[in-house]
Amino acid sequence: MLLEFACSNHKSIRNEVLFSAMAGKDNTFEEKTKEIPGGRVLKSAIIYGANGAGKSNLIDAISFVKNLVVNSINHQPGQGIRQIPHKLDGFSADSTYRIQFVTQNIRYVFGFSLRNMLVSDEYLYYFPNNRQTKIYERTAKSFSAGYKFRGKFSACKDVLKPNRLLLSCAANFSAVKEIADAYNFFGNELVVYHPANQSNWMNYSLYQMNTNPKMKSAVLNFLSELGTGIKDIHVTVDEKMLESSELPPFLSDEFKALLLQNSVNAITARVNYDKFDIDLIQEESTGTQKLFAILCPIIDIMMNGKVLICDELESSLHESLVFGLVKLFINTQTNKFAQMFLTTHETGLLNLDLFRRDQIWFAEMRKEDRSTDLYSLAEIKNVRKEDNFGRGYISGKYGAVPMLNLNFADIVSEM
């Protein structure tokens, strides 16, 4: 479970912003929250904002942390950490990241700061018996371990570099269960989706539907619930040799010869409706293609209690499909507590039949320094449950909407 995420000096995010998945005082849909020591955790949340307000940069910051944890062990000496700070602060100011999460029923807090593209400090705590306990604290290249963990990270001293996170090093060069569990959260339990990921997700989904009958059945049930009219899908995976005509002409003859020696998997998929079937990749709509690409990963996330962070789920999808997909995720009961947090422009989701006020968030651009502010609907005063939130958002009642009250007739008349 993701509990909260905070960061500063990352792209349009200048001053620290905090996104929290902890439930507030609202008592609606409590059956869709999960109780942990100290509060209740929300299953989902949506983040709205104008283009350029920075909501995607919040997702980017979470993705950045995930990737740095998983991959910084591979950074070479002298290589800086690729991160984009706010234009007015730059690399010389601290960029900070902090995340609280639960894995293996234990709460963790992990954070670090960057300055001049290198790690300036880092820490990892956990809460056995609900009491904060230090696993390690780090400043630049030196670190100290908590009492229970003394001597456990000695092998990390030689591999720890200013461009590597200690968590990444310790996961590869120690045998500490708490480190392995925290690292596994970032590597396997925290899933970030960008529209650019769709091709990878499609390949995964097609392989799953070809080899996993239970997964295929679950996908077809979801498609039926969403009213797509799809009755079945037939996926075949064949191994074949590449033909020279299939290779781009700009490749060198040596590289072409090398590629032609290797076999590749040829995947075909045909979607069956009542009276006909069509090729998924060549003939089907982009919206249906996206549904097939995301459903298997989403089902896996639901069944295994993972966290899905999704940027603009509605891209290429009809608003009714987005609404149905989110509703299915929220209402489907599984043995694990899965979470979905997404940025969106789809105002149809601004619906208290789906979300509580503390599950609706807004990103807004501050005019004075073009930095991102982040706040929830629960923080706004005089918001009533019976309000039309979609209409209120479009009218600018909650902020985070561009170009309000522009008189386009006057603009055109001046041209």
Image (cartoon, rainbow, N blue to C red):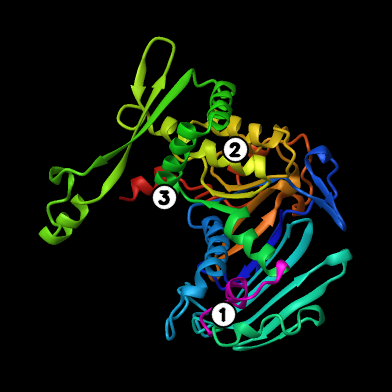
Q: Which residue in the protein does label 3 denote?
A: 196
- Name the residue rendered at 69%, 62% in the picture: 181
- Residue 351 vs residue 181, the one in the foreground: 181
- Residue 42 vs residue 74, the one in the foreground: 74
Quadrant in the rendering for residue 279: top left
Q: Compare marks 1 and 3 and give the one earlier in the sequence.
A: 1
Q: Compare marks 2 and 3 and give the one earlier in the sequence.
A: 3
Residue type at mark 3: give it. Ala
Q: Which residue in the protein does label 2 denote?
A: 299
Q: Which residue in the protein does label 1 denote?
A: 114
Task: Tell me if residue 230 can be seen.
Answer: no
Mark 1 or mark 2, which is nearer to you?
A: 2
Q: In x, y percent, where is residue 51?
A: 48, 52
Quadrant in the rendering for residue 110: bottom right
Q: Compared to 76, does 288 lie above or below?
A: above
- Residue 382 vs residue 35, the one in the foreground: 35
Q: Compared to 84, does 306 lie above or below?
A: above
Q: Compared to 100, does 406 lie above or below?
A: above
Q: In x, y percent, where is residue 382?
A: 79, 47
Q: Compare marks 1 and 2 and give the one earlier in the sequence.
A: 1
- Which residue range is magenta in the image? 161-177
Residue type at mark 1: give it. Leu
